[in-house]
Structures are given as structure tokens and as C-alpha cells.
Image (cartoon, helix red, strand yellow):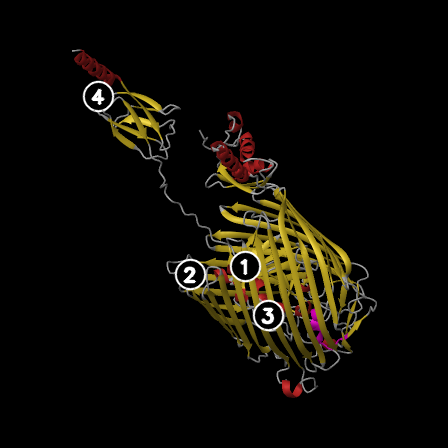
């Protein structure tokens, strides 16, 4: 009897979990992206848009957050972070390689996220 | 004993350690190590820096036990050392000294990033021309030329790229407003104080608002109730006995619902004849204009909605000084004219932005307008009543991402015209026009230095047929602070030949329409292509902000309803274009902020506007080939209570203009081939006493230039040669005015 209750409960629970994780086509995501200037903004947004599924990308130099609207069925925030790191910008999830960072314009040499 | 030894050993080791070094770590509040922090003994130069893990070691100093730890952007700490390992947490300094950067906003802004060649005239620019309505608002803007249409009605006409206002799409918040019956006087029915801003687009413009624009688009925004001030009063009086009053009452019923009531009244009572031609210099008359505007804003649910209800009644009387409207109307006792207009308008719009998808929205606009004009000019009569309905449904969204946006939608236009013309013929031109159209406009922006707008629309019009209107705009930033724009587009329109050329009624010309197989007054619709190229470079000149703007536009008519006043001074002919008709315009503008608060604008314009008339291919009459414009604006720094002085001077120079041919007239009624060049200077001084009160005084045409032969055969206005439509300048001299603005915030 107990077992059955557990199974039902857990299956219900997992169902709700699934429901919560249902992938939305218009998900708002924000995360930190290190950068300094307008040149950074263009580079970061360009990299974000290169990921399929990114519908809107706006990076704000003043607080260092990128505001994304993504189609979760096509990409995740981490995919975008990877693409941004690949062009030399550290993000909350993914760090840029030093050699890419070093090639950035001097005004873009932001403080690295450790 | 063992305990004692252990204690001793511990003590000794402790002692030895303290003789040698202190080890420590420096971190921020988030426990992140700080690299390169300075660590030194207080009041000495003995010190070290931290390594990449925030660690340091330093030999103990005999002089002090206080260690100082500092790091840029963090508070410096002074610590007494009591043990030989230490961890220091530094606090980040959040209170970096605040720097306020102020920049004086310009009256007119030229964008480097918009795709279309748009300039925005803000309130500041609009206030430079204190009086009084939209047709007078452009006197400080070099892109738009303002001139009088005739010597009788005092009506001002605007031109862009050398083409008159019918070729410009004039819209109120994107609903076409000055069109059809209101073409001649419509701009004078919008009080200047109602206007929040004006956007001027040179060239083809967007397809969203319709297919009619050829040389450009002018859109004006009316003040929004949600951010308006509770009370505004403007009063104006001028030397020629023109009085205007504007009051705005605003009420915010809740954080969502607000309303403004705009009341406008003006009257001209002064019968002046400064140039002694027996005619009034300007019309006398009065206008009542009421607008009640409601706004509903629900930001959470993404809804914005407006409702406008408007009523306007305008009466003008012009003509000879001794003309009496009761006894002399439509008689030959004296020449006179009355133009009475009544306008009713109800419009609403609703916008919906998807709450989770800020780039996706719907817009829906509806407007009903009734415009009724009853008028006579001497013995000629002109009555027009246009009832129109306009509806527009818009959807904005993206393709893949916000680099690729689109707007698509539908328009519907219905116009019921009752039009009666009594000149050398009496005819009823009443008709119903309607059109339905669908449009799609795609915008690409690489988020960097390139963008384009490509739009097209398909319309079905009961007289113009089914046709496609394509438009293309490109923007490219080749280097810093510079932009190159190119545009091309097609426009098509039904010319309302009488409503648009009402100045010709104030003459004894015979009207004839030479074609009779077309669908509008016997004529074919007008079709033109417009191509444009513009370049803006902003730069510092000796440390001052400056900009250079160059643009070139060409309008090529494939068909035009030609208005020919050159065939004979006793005739006006309307016919379909046979041959070439084009308008080339070149403008070079240079603006600089000479010192803080002192702005200097200057521009040169070249026009080459030609049409194939019956007689010849001719330059357009009453159009200066060369024009020069300069404006100097100076304002003092705003003091604590808002006190400020503002000074503004505008200089306009117009080169010689070709006059319509009068060669066949008796010599006393001839005007010559060209009108002389002349200049006009306007100036205004505004004194702001506080945030609630300001006064202004100004002068127009301070150089007192007068065109003395404005009315041909003025002594016998029922004679063969009478004509008041050949106006190249101003017919009255200098005019001074004063006014006040009172605001409750």
C-alpha cells in the first residue's frame, strides 16, 4: 500500500517537474557578461545572435547583464554563454580563453571573472 | 610536566615565528582573493604586494605593529598585528565620486542610427516660432520651406524638396491628417501648443502610412495626457491685431486613465493695409478649436489606448478693405472672400504589446473626419465637404531574432467628397473614393553599422486601380560619427486639383481641364519615383560639437496633374504630364555649438524643379533656385528657480524666382520674368521667470521687405488681369508680437 502511494506521489511529482520544465519558446534569461564598452556591446550581442534560437539580446554596459529572450527548444542560456565566451567575454557560466581575451581591443580588456 | 614543556615549546615557537614573518591573505567581501594589494607597515616604506591568490608575507617590523592594507577601489585598512597569520577582508568603495555630465539637448536632432533620413523637432525647436499653428512651426527648419500661397488669404504653404505639401504625407500620430479637402489650410488648424514633436522624413518614407507620400512625410505627435502638466496657458498678441489663446487642462483620474482638454481660440480683428493696395494684408477672422484627449495605460498588460474627440470652426474674411460680407457677398460692389471651415474628428488607437515578448505588438487605429469648407472668392465659389474614415491594423514581430523585424498590416480608407466649383464653369465634382491595402515592411539591423528597411504595399483604389508601392531605405555607418543613407520609392496619388490650388480662385483666370478620359477630374493619377542620398558627419571643430549634413534627392514624375499658369496669364490649365517633370534638390547644412548654449545652424539649398508645360519645359514658378538659411540660438544657463533668457535669430535668403508669364498683359500689369532676391529676418527673445511663467517678444520680417505688386490689377479686381496668386515674398512689412506661457506643474 505504502509503495503504491509513493509511486503515485513520485510520479505526480515528476509530472509536475516535467510541466515546470516544459520548454518555452519565449523565455527571458539574464546572466553576467564581463565587458566594458560599446565595442564590447556589439561583439557580445553579435555572438549571442549567432546562436540559433536567440530572439532578442541586449547587453548593458552599466550593470554587465545580458537580457535574452530565447527559444528553449533550440538553445539554452549556456549555449549563448559559450558563444559569448568564444569571442573573448567571460560569463557567469563560461570563461573566455586567455588567448582570445588577449586579442581584444585594449579598451575591451575588462576585469576577468575569476 | 609534559604539559609545561609543551606550553614552553609552543611559546618558544611562537616567539621565533614572530621574529621572522607575518603571513596573510587579502580578499574582498565575497572571499575573492585580491591580486596586487599593497601591504606595508604603518608609517614606513617597508611593504609588499599580494600574489595571485591574495597571499602575502612580510617581515615583522621593530617599529610598529600596525599593518596597512590598500587596494584600488577598496577601503584602506589599518590593522594591529597580534598573531603571525592574518586574513584581511577589504570593503569595496561604492561611493565613487559622482560625476554629472550635462549636455544641452538640441532643438532638432539628426539621427546617425535610424534607417530613414528623419529629423525630430522637439518642443524646444517648436517654441522658437512662438506663433501659432503648425504651418508656422517650420520657419526655423531648413528642410522645409514656408511661403505664402497668395496675397489674399494669408495662407502659408509648405514645401519639401521643392514640391508643395500635397506631395508630402502629413500625419497626426500616423493617421494621415492633412489631405484631400484640408490640403490648403489643414496645417493652420493645428495649434502649435498641442504639438509635442514633429518628425520630418525626407524622401520616400515608410509604406505603413500609405502610398501617397512622394517627397517626404511629416508626422506630428500631440501631447500625451499621461505625462502632461495639469494646466497650461499661452496667450499671444501681435501688432496686426491677431490674438491667440491656448489653455490645456489635464487630469489624471488614476495611474491608468488620464485626460487633457485643449482649448484654442484665435481672432484677427485688425483691418490693415500696410502696402496700400486697397486689400487687407491678412484675413480677419476667428477660430475655435477644441480637442479632448483620453489616454488609458495599462503597462502590466501591455495596453495603451487613446481616444480623441475634436471640433474646429474657422472663419476667415479677406479682400478689399471696404468689403462688407452682408451686402457685397458675390457681387461686384467690392471684391471679397470668405472661407468658413468646420471640422469634426473622432479617432482612437489601441496598442497591445505581448507582456513576455516585448518585440511583438498589435496596433489598431480608427479615425473619422468630417471637413466642410464653404467659400467664395470674388464671384467664384468653392464648397467642399469631405467625410472620411481611415482604419489601420498593424502587427509587429521578428523573424528568428530582433535583427530581423517586420511590420505588416492592412489599411482601409473611405472618402466621400461633396465638391462644388463655380468659376468660369459650374460643376459638381462629388464622388466617393475608397481604397484597401495590405503592406509588409522588413527591417534588418546588424546591430552595428548597417540596416535596411524594405517595404511594399498592394492597394486597390476605386480610381487608382490595383497597384504596388515599393520602398527601400539603407543606412550604413562607414566610420565613426558618420552615416550614409540611400532611399528609393514610388508614390501614387489622386490630385485634388481644386482643393490643392485654392490660391488660384483669387484671380480672374479661367479654369480648364484639358483631359476628360481620366478618373479624377478627367485626369490620370500622379505617379512619381523618389531617390535620395544623404551623408551626415558629426565631429569636433576646435573642441566644439559640429555636424555637416549633405543630401541630394530626385523626384521623377511618371505622370503628374500639371497645373499650368504659364500658357496665358488669364488661364489656368490642368492636364496630364506629357514629357518630363522632375525636382532635384541639394542641401548642405552645417551646425555647430560655438560655445556652450550658443548654437549656429546654417544651410544652403539648390533646387532644380522643371515641368514640361504646353509652351515649354520650364523651371517651376515661384520657386527660388538658391536659398540660404542661418539661425543663431543662444540661451543663458538655467538658474535655481528656472530663470533663463533665450535669444533666437533666423535669416532666410531666397534667390530670384521665375514668375508666371505675364508678357501678354498690358505693360502696367506685367511683373517681369524674375522676382528679385530678398532676405527675411525673424527674431525672438524669451524670458523665463520661473518654472511657471515665461514671456516672449519677437519680430517677423524685421528687415521690412515687401512685395509691392502682390496683387495684379488690384484697383479693379473684377478686371481681366486681376491675380493675387503670384506671390514670391511677403506683402506686408515688419510685424512684432508678444506672448506669455503659464504652467502649473
Q: Secondary structure at mark 2?
A: strand
Q: On screen, B426 above or below B364?
A: below
Numbered label attached to residue B631 = 1
Q: Secondary structure at mark 4?
A: loop
Residue B689: % across, % down: 40, 65
**How far is disc 1 from disc 2 in space, using C-alphas?**
19 Å
Which residue is the extreme one toward the front? A1
Closer to the chain start, of discs 1 and 3, is: 3
**How far is disc 2 from disc 3 in space, using C-alphas?**
31 Å
The residue labelled by disc 2 is: B644
Tag 4 and tag 2, C-beta contact below 8 Å: no
The residue labelled by disc 3 is: B189
Q: Is residue B506 magenta?
A: yes
Closer to the chain start, of discs 1 and 2, is: 1
Q: Are marks 1 and 2 on the same chain?
A: yes
The residue labelled by disc 4 is: B62
Q: Are marks 1 and 3 on the same chain?
A: yes
Q: Are marks 4 and 2 on the same chain?
A: yes
Tag 2 and tag 3, C-beta contact below 8 Å: no
Q: Quadrant of the N terminus of chain B?
A: top left
Tag 1 and tag 4, C-beta contact below 8 Å: no
Residue B590: % across, % down: 57, 52
Bounds of the magenta segment: B499-510
Q: Chain of mark 1?
A: B
Q: Are marks 3 and 4 on the same chain?
A: yes
Of the residues tagged 4 and 2, which is closer to the observer? Answer: 4
Of the residues tagged 1 and 2, which is closer to the observer? Answer: 2
Closer to the chain start, of discs 1 and 4, is: 4
Closer to the chain start, of discs 4 and 2, is: 4
Amino acid at each position: 500500500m505504502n509503495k503504491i502511494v509513493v509511486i503515485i506521489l513520485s510520479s505526480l511529482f515528476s509530472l509536475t517537474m516535467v510541466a515546470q520544465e516544459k520548454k518555452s519558446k519565449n523565455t527571458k534569461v539574464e546572466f553576467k557578461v564581463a565587458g566594458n564598452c560599446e565595442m564590447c556591446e556589439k561583439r557580445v550581442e553579435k555572438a549571442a545572435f549567432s546562436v540559433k534560437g536567440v530572439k532578442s539580446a541586449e547587453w548593458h554596459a552599466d550593470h554587465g547583464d545580458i537580457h535574452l529572450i530565447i527559444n528553449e527548444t533550440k538553445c539554452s542560456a549556456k549555449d549563448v554563454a559559450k558563444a559569448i565566451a568564444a569571442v573573448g567575454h567571460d560569463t557567469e557560466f563560461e570563461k573566455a580563453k586567455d588567448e582570445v581575451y588577449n586579442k581584444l581591443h585594449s579598451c575591451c580588456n575588462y576585469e576577468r571573472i575569476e | 610536566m609534559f604539559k609545561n614543556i609543551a606550553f614552553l615549546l609552543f611559546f618558544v615557537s611562537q616567539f621565533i615565528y614572530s621574529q621572522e614573518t607575518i603571513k596573510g591573505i587579502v580578499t574582498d567581501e565575497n572571499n575573492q582573493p585580491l591580486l596586487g594589494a599593497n601591504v606595508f607597515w604603518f608609517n614606513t616604506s617597508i611593504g609588499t604586494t599580494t600574489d595571485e591568490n591574495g597571499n602575502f608575507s612580510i617581515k615583522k617590523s621593530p617599529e610598529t605593529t600596525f599593518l596597512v592594507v590598500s587596494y584600488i577601489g577598496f577601503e584602506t585598512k589599518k590593522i594591529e598585528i597580534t598573531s603571525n597569520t592574518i586574513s584581511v577582508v577589504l570593503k569595496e568603495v561604492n561611493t565613487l565620486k559622482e560625476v554629472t555630465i550635462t549636455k544641452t539637448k538640441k532643438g532638432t536632432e539628426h539621427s546617425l542610427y535610424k534607417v530613414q533620413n528623419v529629423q525630430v523637432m522637439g518642443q524646444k525647436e517648436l517654441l522658437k516660432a512662438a506663433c501659432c499653428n503648425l504651418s508656422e512651426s517650420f520657419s526655423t527648419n531648413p528642410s522645409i520651406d514656408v511661403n505664402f500661397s497668395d496675397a489674399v488669404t494669408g495662407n502659408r504653404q509648405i514645401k519639401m524638396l521643392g514640391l508643395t505639401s500635397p506631395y508630402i504625407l502629413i500625419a497626426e500620430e500616423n493617421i494621415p491628417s492633412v489631405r484631400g479637402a484640408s490640403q490648403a489650410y489643414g496645417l493652420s488648424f493645428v495649434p502649435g501648443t498641442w504639438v509635442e514633436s514633429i518628425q520630418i522624413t525626407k524622401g520616400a518614407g515608410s509604406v505603413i502610412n500609405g502610398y501617397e507620400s512622394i517627397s517626404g512625410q511629416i508626422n506630428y505627435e500631440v501631447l500625451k495626457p499621461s505625462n502632461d502638466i495639469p494646466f497650461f496657458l499661452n496667450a499671444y498678441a501681435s501688432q496686426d491685431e491677431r490674438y491667440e489663446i491656448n489653455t490645456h487642462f489635464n487630469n489624471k483620474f488614476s495611474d491608468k486613465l488620464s485626460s487633457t482638454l485643449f482649448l484654442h481660440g484665435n481672432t484677427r480683428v485688425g483691418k490693415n493695409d500696410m502696402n496700400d493696395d486697397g486689400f487687407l494684408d491678412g484675413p480677419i477672422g476667428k477660430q475655435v478649436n477644441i480637442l479632448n484627449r483620453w489616454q488609458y495605460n495599462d503597462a502590466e498588460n501591455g495596453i495603451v489606448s487613446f481616444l480623441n474627440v475634436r471640433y474646429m470652426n474657422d472663419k476667415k474674411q479677406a479682400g478689399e478693405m471696404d468689403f462688407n460680407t452682408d451686402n457685397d457677398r458675390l457681387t461686384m460692389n467690392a471684391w471679397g472672400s470668405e472661407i468658413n471651415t468646420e471640422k469634426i474628428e473622432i479617432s482612437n488607437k489601441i496598442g497591445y504589446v505581448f507582456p513576455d515578448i516585448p518585440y511583438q505588438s498589435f496596433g489598431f487605429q480608427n479615425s473619422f473626419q468630417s471637413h466642410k469648407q464653404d467659400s467664395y472668392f470674388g464671384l467664384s465659389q468653392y464648397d467642399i465637404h469631405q467625410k472620411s474614415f481611415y482604419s489601420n491594423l498593424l502587427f509587429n514581430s521578428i523573424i528568428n531574432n530582433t535583427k530581423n523585424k517586420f511590420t505588416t498590416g492592412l489599411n482601409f480608407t473611405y472618402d466621400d467628397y461633396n465638391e462644388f466649383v463655380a468659376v468660369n464653369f459650374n460643376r459638381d465634382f462629388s464622388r466617393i473614393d475608397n481604397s484597401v491595402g495590405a503592406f509588409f515592411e522588413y527591417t534588418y539591423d546588424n546591430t552595428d553599422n548597417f540596416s535596411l528597411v524594405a517595404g511594399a504595399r498592394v492597394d486597390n483604389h476605386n480610381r487608382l486601380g490595383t497597384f504596388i508601392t515599393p520602398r527601400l531605405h539603407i543606412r550604413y555607418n562607414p566610420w565613426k560619427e558618420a552615416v550614409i543613407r540611400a532611399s528609393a520609392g514610388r508614390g501614387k496619388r489622386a490630385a485634388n486639383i481644386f482643393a490643392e490650388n485654392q490660391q488660384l480662385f483669387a484671380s480672374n483666370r479661367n479654369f480648364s481641364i484639358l483631359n476628360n478620359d481620366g478618373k479624377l477630374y478627367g485626369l490620370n493619377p500622379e505617379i512619381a519615383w523618389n531617390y535620395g542620398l544623404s551623408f551626415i558627419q558629426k565631429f569636433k571643430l576646435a573642441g566644439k560639437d559640429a555636424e555637416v549634413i549633405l543630401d541630394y534627392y530626385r523626384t521623377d514624375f511618371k505622370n503628374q496633374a500639371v497645373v499650368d499658369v504659364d500658357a496665358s496669364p488669364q488661364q489656368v490649365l490642368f492636364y496630364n504630364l506629357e514629357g518630363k517633370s522632375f525636382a532635384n534638390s541639394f542641401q548642405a547644412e552645417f551646425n555647430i555649438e560655438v560655445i556652450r548654449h550658443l548654437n549656429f545652424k546654417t544651410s544652403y539649398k539648390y533646387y532644380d524643379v522643371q515641368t514640361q508645360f504646353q509652351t515649354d519645359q520650364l523651371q517651376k514658378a515661384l520657386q527660388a533656385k538658391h536659398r540660404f538659411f542661418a539661425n543663431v540660438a543662444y540661451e543663458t544657463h538655467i538658474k535655481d528657480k528656472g530663470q533663463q533668457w533665450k535669444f533666437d535669430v533666423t535669416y532666410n535668403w531666397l534667390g530670384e524666382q521665375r514668375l508666371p508669364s505675364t508678357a501678354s498683359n498690358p505693360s502696367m500689369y506685367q511683373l517681369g520674368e524674375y522676382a528679385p532676391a530678398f532676405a527675411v529676418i525673424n527674431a525672438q527673445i524669451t524670458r523665463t521667470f520661473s518654472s511657471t511663467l515665461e514671456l516672449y517678444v519677437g519680430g517677423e520680417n524685421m528687415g521690412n521687405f515687401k512685395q509691392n505688386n502682390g496683387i495684379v490689377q488690384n484697383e479693379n479686381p473684377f478686371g481681366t488681369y486681376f491675380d493675387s496668386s503670384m506671390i514670391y515674398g511677403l506683402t506686408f512689412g515688419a510685424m512684432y508680437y508678444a506672448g506669455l506661457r503659464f504652467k502649473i506643474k
